Image (cartoon, rainbow, N blue to C red):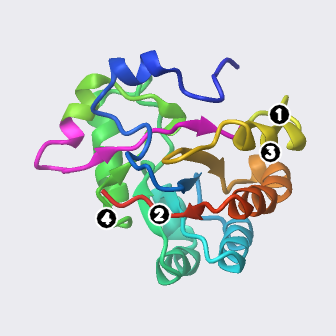
Amino acid sequence: MFYTVKIPAWITKIYPSRIWKIDTKDKKLYLTFDDGPHPTITSFVLDELKKKNARATFFCIGKNVQLYPDVYARILNEGHAVGNHTQDHLDGWKTKDSEYLDNIAIAKKYIDSSLFRPPYGKITRFQQKQLSAPRFKMQTIMWTILSGDFDEKVSPEQCVRNVLLNGNEGSIIVFHDSEKAKLKLEFSLGKVLDYFGSKGYAFEKISI
């Protein structure tokens, strides 16, 4: 599995219409959590965020919102933002355009948001163009930093370092509130909140 922890500048220039970082000079960071909601893992994340008065953005899978509506409601009730992550976690590069867009439309019934993040970060130019059209009116949110919590080869300690060494003003940081990421997320999240909090950073939700 190849990926870069911090997104290279040349990629952001190739896809300038996608949001890779929030334009701000203030000491603000944007934590995001993909693949939930999950009954226990998302609840853990919400508990940790609440302790630090932090806000975040949860890119939810539609079928998980259907399964755990109470957890989804808690995300919203506690002041966080949500985004669409498709109904079934589809790979845009491997899925027919019509099927992919219809899957997003299904998720949109359960996730009221203009924010979209493609699973695996894989979406074609055509698919993205359709998302910005009147049918969807959605903005594609990518990231600045991947924590690596999804990668079995990355240790919990490295996951923390990935974020601490690369985060700065406006960074969009990816974690996952999923079974696969559970141990690394539990190890990392509090440390990330504490470290940047001690540096005077605030954690905000994405609002575009």
Mark nearest the camera among 1 and 4 is 1
Counting residues from the start of the chain, the first of labels 3 and 2 encountered is 3
Q: Circle 1 — which element?
A: loop
Q: Is residue 56 left or right of residue 110?
A: right
In three-dimensional space, the C-alpha distance between marks 3 and 2, rounded to whole angstroms, equals: 20 Å
In three-dimensional space, the C-alpha distance between marks 1 and 2, rounded to whole angstroms, equals: 28 Å
What residue is pinned by disc 4?
Answer: 109
What residue is pinned by disc 1?
Answer: 152
Visible residue check, residue 150: no
Mark nearest the camera among 1 and 3 is 3
Amino acid found under the numbered disc labelled 3? Val
Counting residues from the start of the chain, the first of labels 4 and 2 encountered is 4
Counting residues from the start of the chain, the first of labels 3 and 4 encountered is 4
Which one is in front, 179 or 79? 79
Compared to residue 179, the image places residue 66 above or below, namely: below
Compared to residue 194, the image places residue 128 above or below, namely: above
Q: Could you classify mark 3 by the number of other residues whose Cα lies within 10 Å: few (under 14), some (14-19), or many (20 or more)?
A: many
Q: Circle 2 — which element?
A: loop
Residue 195 in the image: state x and y as whole percent: 76, 57
In three-dimensional space, the C-alpha distance between marks 3 and 4, rounded to whole angstroms, equals: 35 Å
Q: Which quadrant of the rendered structure holds the C terminus? A: bottom left
Span highlighted in magenta in the image: 130-150
In three-dimensional space, the C-alpha distance between marks 1 and 3, rounded to whole angstroms, equals: 14 Å
Mark nearest the camera among 4 and 2 is 2
Q: Circle 3 — which element?
A: helix
Q: Main secondary structure of the magenta part?
A: loop
The verdict on residue 97 being magenta is: no
Counting residues from the start of the chain, the first of labels 1 and 2 encountered is 1
Q: Are marks 3 and 4 in contact (CB under 8 Å)?
A: no
In three-dimensional space, the C-alpha distance between marks 1 and 4, rounded to whole angstroms, equals: 33 Å
